[in-house]
Amino acid sequence: MTKSAEQQWAAALGTGPTRAVRRVAAASLGGRTEAFYEASGGEPVVVTGLLDGDATLGGLDLAGMQAVLAGVELEGYSRETSERETFSAGEFFAELRSGRARHNVVDHPVASTPLRGRVGAPPFFGSNWIADGGEGLTISPLSLTLTPAGNFTPLHVDSYGMQGWMLLLEGLKCWRFVAPEHSRPRMDPVSADVGDAPPSAWNGVERLETELRGGELMFIPPGWAHVVWTPEASVGVGGSVLNEHVLEATLASWHSELALGHSDEVDVAALAARAIAAGNDAPSLRHGITAHDRWQHARS
């Protein structure tokens, strides 16, 4: 018998100590990049209060998103086969409200919808090499997430050492995280996937845990493995970030995948070099390029 999403969530990481994800109010950051990364401390962090006074985002609950996306073709994953498919937004929302949604919308580019130019990444992320100079990349700096109730996303690590974020506009999502120093040794040498390890492989490993509700943003630092359960139908926007911040962690995660023959579609070092050429003089950038050169030399 197939396990329910709740059962998969409960069993995903075996048994181990749990710690709550840190939470910080958006008002305390003042949009400042340094304040945000300091609040994170290299770990996942929830930023609260992001819908306060925002008429655009505040109107993008399930009903608002349905109205905006009327007539749009969406891309998402079949909940039955996990294959990526295209379908109408009208069909999707009708199924979502009836509790019979056949798809999970993840990574659908905002740029291909009427929301283009109306929503964006919070300013506290600062620069984003993907958005600023990543033409031709197969990843999107801003995307939609439309998730049916009862959906379960297995344990995984975001590729290319990217920082990830999700701003939930309505609904509820439950998250668990495992730090890179624990997830990296458990990567499958063929697939570079951490989800192939049995739950017992994670016994005794500390995990961070939180619930995310409307108006809250979840930040996923580079290399952090995570698993997500969605008890309530949820709608949000999110994206991927590559910049000079937490660059050491970014390179460590990217290098671990390159060493297994994966993640070669995005050249993080080349994007860093492009940022330097454009005038970014952050010391972490040059240190990162030096570290990458040493890594390449050690592999040759």
Image (cartoon, helix red, strand yellow):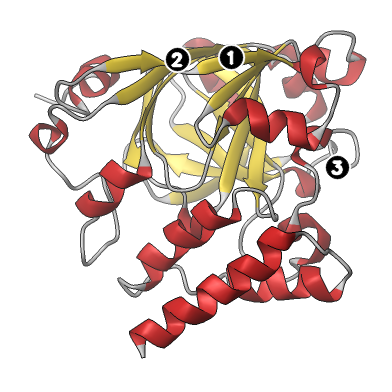
Residue 25: % across, % down: 71, 12
| Residue occupying the point 79% across, 71% down | 276
Q: CA distance from mark 2 to mark 1?
A: 9 Å
Split into 4 quadrants, where in the image is the N terminus? Answer: top left
From this viewpoint, which residue is outermost toward the bottom? 300
Which structural element holds mark 1?
strand
Image quadrant of residue 4?
top left
Which structural element holds mark 2?
strand
Residue where numbered disc 3 is placed: 116
Residue 288 visible, this orientation: yes
Q: Which one is in front in this view, the residue at disc 1 or the one at disc 3?
A: 1
Amino acid at the residue labelled 3: Arg
| Residue occupying the point 29% across, 16% down | 18
Query: Number of labelled discs?
Result: 3
For residue 226, above or below residue 244: above
Residue 37 relative to residue 75: left or right: right
Residue 23's mark?
1
Q: CA distance from mark 1 to mark 3?
A: 29 Å
Residue 296: % across, % down: 44, 82
Image quadrant of residue 102?
top left
Confirm or deny contact between disc 2 and disc 3 (CB under 8 A): no
Residue 272's mark?
none
Residue 265: % across, % down: 53, 73
Residue 249: % across, % down: 50, 52
Residue 210's mark?
2
Confirm or deny contact between disc 2 and disc 1 (CB under 8 A): yes
Confirm or deny contact between disc 1 and disc 3 (CB under 8 A): no
For residue 122, above or below residue 30: below
Residue 90 visible, this orientation: no
Amino acid at the residue labelled 2: Thr
Image quadrant of residue 124?
top right
Instruction: State the residue in front, 265 or 294.
Output: 294
